[in-house]
């Protein structure tokens, strides 16, 4: 399956600042998704990153807080804006095509202090 | 989207066979059952997928009864390195836009 490179792998950020996480796939994929995973918890879908249009957000997540870009079929970014300690979590990107299993990046471990 | 229910945790010993059952009563006709494995500090990794009866690969077997309302992931002769969280998901693989909804997962601890 395709390989996703996600960076940074971890970061410690000051509250009130923003962090942009990058996700690069080694081949074109139809769909890309962003997830959040609290320590010891399952994955929660934040949004679907749509190529060339606005992302589709899940309930509880808004564009002003988590702006997403997807300029082409191999790249996407997620920004965590105006961070607070409650945003400390692992953020993962995922990609998939029809009739293929989803694949995931290694995740970005974010700590907000 | 079909909801899945799994045991929160399981313990096993090296060399044993482990069976993790997942309940998905509202599975749709076009849905497949897919299992993912997640190690600490890594993203989930695909293990196996099936629609009905039995599927086997080099890692695991997946048993799905005729009514498809449940499934069982079978890991033969587990080792310490199989300690991970295992997630059962249902969805239509032909629809790339069908986002994956993760349930709680089963935390498997393999002991020496």
Image: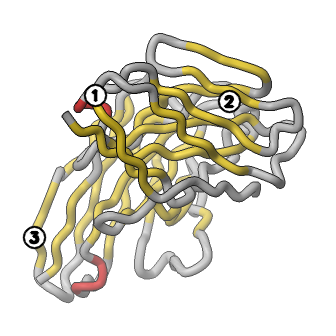
Q: Are marks 1 and 3 on the same chain?
A: no
Label 1 marks a residue whose chain is B
Give the percent coordinates (x, y) of residue B109: 31, 45
- The residue to which callout 3 is attached is A12
Camera-side residue of A58 and A72: A58
Where does label 1 land, which residue? B14
Q: Which mark is residue B112?
A: none
Q: Nearer the viewer, residue B56 or B94?
A: B56
Quarter of the rendering containing residue A18: bottom left
- State how far apart marks 3 and 2 are (Cα): 36 Å
Q: Which residue is mark 2?
A: A98
Q: Residues within 10 Å of mark 1 (few under 14, many from 20)?
A: some
Q: Position of residue B64 (x, y in %)?
A: 74, 30
Query: In front of the other: label 1 or label 3?
Result: 1
Q: Position of residue A51 (x, y in %)?
A: 56, 47
Label 2: few (<14), some or many (≥20) within 10 Å?
Answer: some
């Amino acid at each position: 399956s395709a390989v996703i490179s996600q960076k940074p792998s971890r970061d410690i950020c000051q509250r009130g600042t923003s962090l942009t996480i990058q996700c690069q796939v080694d081949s074109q994929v139809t769909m890309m998704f962003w997830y959040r995973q609290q320590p010891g918890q399952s994955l929660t879908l934040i949004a679907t990153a749509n190529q060339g249009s606005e992302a589709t957000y899940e309930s509880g997540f808004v564009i002003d807080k988590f702006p997403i870009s997807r300029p082409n079929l191999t790249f996407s970014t997620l920004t965590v804006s105006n961070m607070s300690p409650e945003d400390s979590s692992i953020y993962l990107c995922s990609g998939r095509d029809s009739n293929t299993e989803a694949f995931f990046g290694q995740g970005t471990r974010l700590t907000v202090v | 989207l079909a909801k899945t229910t799994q045991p929160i945790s399981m313990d096993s010993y090296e060399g044993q066979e482990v069976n993790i059952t997942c309940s998905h009563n509202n599975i749709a006709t076009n849905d497949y059952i897919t299992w993912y494995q997640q190690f600490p500090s890594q993203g989930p990794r695909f293990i196996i997928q099936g629609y009905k009866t039995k599927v086997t690969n080099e890692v695991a077997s997946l048993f799905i009864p005729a009514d498809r309302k449940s499934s069982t992931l079978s890991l033969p002769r587990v080792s310490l390195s199989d300690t991970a969280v295992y997630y059962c998901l249902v969805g239509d693989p032909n629809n790339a836009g069908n986002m994956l909804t993760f349930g709680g997962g089963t935390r498997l601890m393999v002991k020496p």
